[in-house]
Image (cartoon, helix red, strand yellow):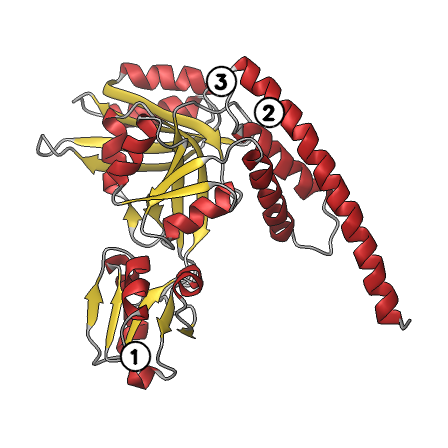
Amino acid sequence: MNKIGRLRKKIDAIDRKMLALLSERGKVAQGIGKMKREKGAGVLVPSREQSIYDRLSRFNKGPYRREAVLSIFREIISATRALEAPLRISYLGPEATFTHMAAVRHFGSSAEFVPEAGIENIFAAVTRGESDFGVVPIENSTEGVVSHTLDLFVDSDLSISSEEVLKIAHHLLSREEGIGRIDRVYSHPHAIAQCRNWLMTHLPNVPVKEMESTAAAAKRAAGERHSAAIASEFASSRYGLPVRAREIQDQPQNFTRFLIIGRQPPRRTGRDKTSILFMTRDEVGILHQILGSFARQKINLTKIESRPLKKRAWEYMFFADLDGHLSERRIARALSEVQKKCTFFKILGSYPKSRI
């Protein structure tokens, strides 16, 4: 046997050991699942999963990159949960949207994914208990906040259980081998806006038609000659549409943040974020006072954005993110102070930060 053959035999032996350990891990997890059911506890515990990923990141010595190790274990955890019953996850459809990508990345491919026609449908499915969790977009680094998601939080009893930040890479997908044969392009308005310079340079006279999603654009282009779609590589594989030009977005650092919404708030992990919605009293300097409440407690406010009220002109609601968990004394003190200065105040959730 040559040297390569001996090394391959060694890999085969390692694979058998890995499979035996995976089976052992699964049996232990089944025992934990049985005890959870007896106590009426949920299958998913974000704080526990976060601690697993943090520990793996510390212990990883290579040669695999941290992201690769976490991806492998995400699938192991997803498959382990499915031994009991797969989680049912609602996302903004159709299949192969960026929201679908974020859902698979967060929950692993062994979950059951349910496409919904609108963000309001996701909130409704989770509220009724038809889905365990929902995945909704909240902001894009170039396009800004998703106002509809914020509006739905105002009247919802759901809380944020986690977040996922996805790097957005737009590709030109087409059945045509050369872009000179393309006579129309489909995509979502946001994707079109993010690729405007590339389109003007490479397809200046080709009409660009708006679709409800990048996935719908890929599906449409897959069934037509001489057409293309601006969509993800995920959509390329789902709809059998080859990539003809990669990463055509104008800004290379393009990220979308997604929120995972559920019915139960997660426990503290030590690496958390809290999101709130509030409307201030109509007083001079009131916003300055609110910001001072956070400053006095040495709380880092990572985001604050105003949102006009739909029912009253020239009045605004604020959406804010801050570092820390509601269970921390300093966070609780600051939020208690802020609430006294507001006509509307709502904590959307304290939850683990994204790994990006």
Q: How far apart are marks 1 and 3 (CA)?
A: 52 Å
Query: Which residue was labeled with disc 3?
Result: 327
- Residue 136 visible to an observer of this rendering: no
User: Is residue 174 depicted above or below 236 in this figure?
Assistant: below
Q: Name the residue under label 2.
A: 33
List x then y, in percent, for residue 148.
Answer: 23, 40
**In-image side of 315 versus 9 (left or right):** left
Decide: is 266 above or below 66.
above
Where is residue 158 drawn, in percent x and y? 34, 26
Give the alpha-carbon distance from disc 3 to disc 2, as whole Å: 26 Å
Q: Quadrant of residue 174?
A: bottom left
Q: What element carries label 2?
A: helix
Residue type at tag 2 = Gly
Residue 163 seen in the current view: yes
Q: Residue 253 carries which label?
A: none
Contact check, label 1 and label 3, Cβ < 8 Å: no
Residue 216, percent from left and from top:
28, 59
Q: Which residue is drawn at 69% across and 31% down?
A: 27
Instruction: Specify the quadrant of the image occupied by residue 171.
Output: bottom left
Query: In the rendered image, which residue does mark 1 sit on?
Result: 201
Above or below, 252 against 206 in this view is above
Question: Amino acid under label 3?
Answer: Ser
The residue sitting at 27% across, 66% down in the picture is 220
Of mark 3 and mark 2, the one earlier in the sequence is 2
**Residue 150 spot, x, y in % from top left:** 27, 35
Residue drawn at x 35%, y 26% as measured from the top left:
129
Foreground: 158 or 225? 225
Residue occupying the point 31% across, 26% down: 128
In the image, residue 234 sits, relative to residue 120, either above or below, namely: below
Structural distance between the alpha carbons of marks 2 and 1: 56 Å
